[in-house]
Image: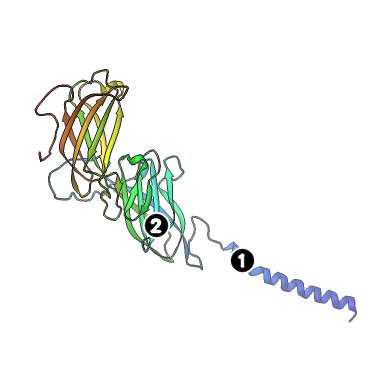
């Protein structure tokens, strides 16, 4: 065989081997998993979709002295119905896995999370609220909120198992706060600019594992008056995380002028609160009444 022909034959064999060697990786790339398809892979990593909802009902129940638990509602609400922010974190053997994932109401598919996880057992912590910034999920025993201000808040803390067949999992968050409605029974003088609500006995830090308050907090909420709130029967709402299913708050309601100087003040003792329920307190600040400062349904302790 002539040298040139021999070289051409060797070159042809080498090119055939080269393309044969490239064929398998190209086929594997065409089988790569993408979002919304089968999430199984060969390395034990799964792309999972978590779809969140809130356990209803939407409204708080009136405070009740009974210790019996209400039956669980079948109502599930979209997260966007009651909350504007949601955060999701995963823990394994007590240690946090990756970073906390945050969403706001403006994000597409608010309440739905798609992420990649290794196979295994995880502890999931999800929090939904309407604060001015995202919640901080520090550990399985501590979640804090911006400026320690509480809004209507929902929690899920549960174990999830990621296996070869896992593609989608639901997250159902339950309300973990109590609400106090403070009703001012008399007209508010025009000199008043704000009401300040200072209360102790509850918490502004959440323990996801117990679902109750993690710390003894001193909570302060300021409410600037709107024109319609100078008449009698103006109502203001504040929230707290009880340390157990039922808790007791000590509250101080103060009327302030534009310079934050005190105009009037009323102390409300033994305000009973319960997770998922609202306690209404009716009070006078600018005149005397022996019945003022009592919570409806309170025990009077």
Residue 141: numbered disc: none
Asked which secondary structure carries label 2, the reply is strand
60 or 242: which is nearer to us? 242
Asked which secondary structure carries label 1, the reply is helix
Packing grade of label 1 (10 A; few <14, some 14-19, many >=20) is few
Judge whether 85 appears above or below 97 on screen.
above
**Image-quadrant location for residue 15:** bottom right
157 or 93: which is nearer to us? 93
> Farthest residue toward the bottom?
1
> Farthest residue toward the right?
2
Can you give x and y, in whole percent of width and height, for residue 29 in the image? Answer: 60, 63
Can you give x and y, in whole percent of width and height, for residue 63 in the image? Answer: 17, 41
265 horizontally vs 41: left or right: left
Quadrant (top left/top right/bottom left/bottom right) for the N terminus: bottom right
**Residue under pointer 2:** 90
96 horizontally vs 17: left or right: left
Packing grade of label 2 (10 A; few <14, some 14-19, many >=20) is many
Residue 27: numbered disc: 1
Can you give x and y, in whole percent of width and height, for residue 135 in the image? Answer: 38, 45
- Residue drawn at (26%, 36%), measured in percent from left and top? 238
131 or 257: which is nearer to us? 257
């Amino acid at each position: 065989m002539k040298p040139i022909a021999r070289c051409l034959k060797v070159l042809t064999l080498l090119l055939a081997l080269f393309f044969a060697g490239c064929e398998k990786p190209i086929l594997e790339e065409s089988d790569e998993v993408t979002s919304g398809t089968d999430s199984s892979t060969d390395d034990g990593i799964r792309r999972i979709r978590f779809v969140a909802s809130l356990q209803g009902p939407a409204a708080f129940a009136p405070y009740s002295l009974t210790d019996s638990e209400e039956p669980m509602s079948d109502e599930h609400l979209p997260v966007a119905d009651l909350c504007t922010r949601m955060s999701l974190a995963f823990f394994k053997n007590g240690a946090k896995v990756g970073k906390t994932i945050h969403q706001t109401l403006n994000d597409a598919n608010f309440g739905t999370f798609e992420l990649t996880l290794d196979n295994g057992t995880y502890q999931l912590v999800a929090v939904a609220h309407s604060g001015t910034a995202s919640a901080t999920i520090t550990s399985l025993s501590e979640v804090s909120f911006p400026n320690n201000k509480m809004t209507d808040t929902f929690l899920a803390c549960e174990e999830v198992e990621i296996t070869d067949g896992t593609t989608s999992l639901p997250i159902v968050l339950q309300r973990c706060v109590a609400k106090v409605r403070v009703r001012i029974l008399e007209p508010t003088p025009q000199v008043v600019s704000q009401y300040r609500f200072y209360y102790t006995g509850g918490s502004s830090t959440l323990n996801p594992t117990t679902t109750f308050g993690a710390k003894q907090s001193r909570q302060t909420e300021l409410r600037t008056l709107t024109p319609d709130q100078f008449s009698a029967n103006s109502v203001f709402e504040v929230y707290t995380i009880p340390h157990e299913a039922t808790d007791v708050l000590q509250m101080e309601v103060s009327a302030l002028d534009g310079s934050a100087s005190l105009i009037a003040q009323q102390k409300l003792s033994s305000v009973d609160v319960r997770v998922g329920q609202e306690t209404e307190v009716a009070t006078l600040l600018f005149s005397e009444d022996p019945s003022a400062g009592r919570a409806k349904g309170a025990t009077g302790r």
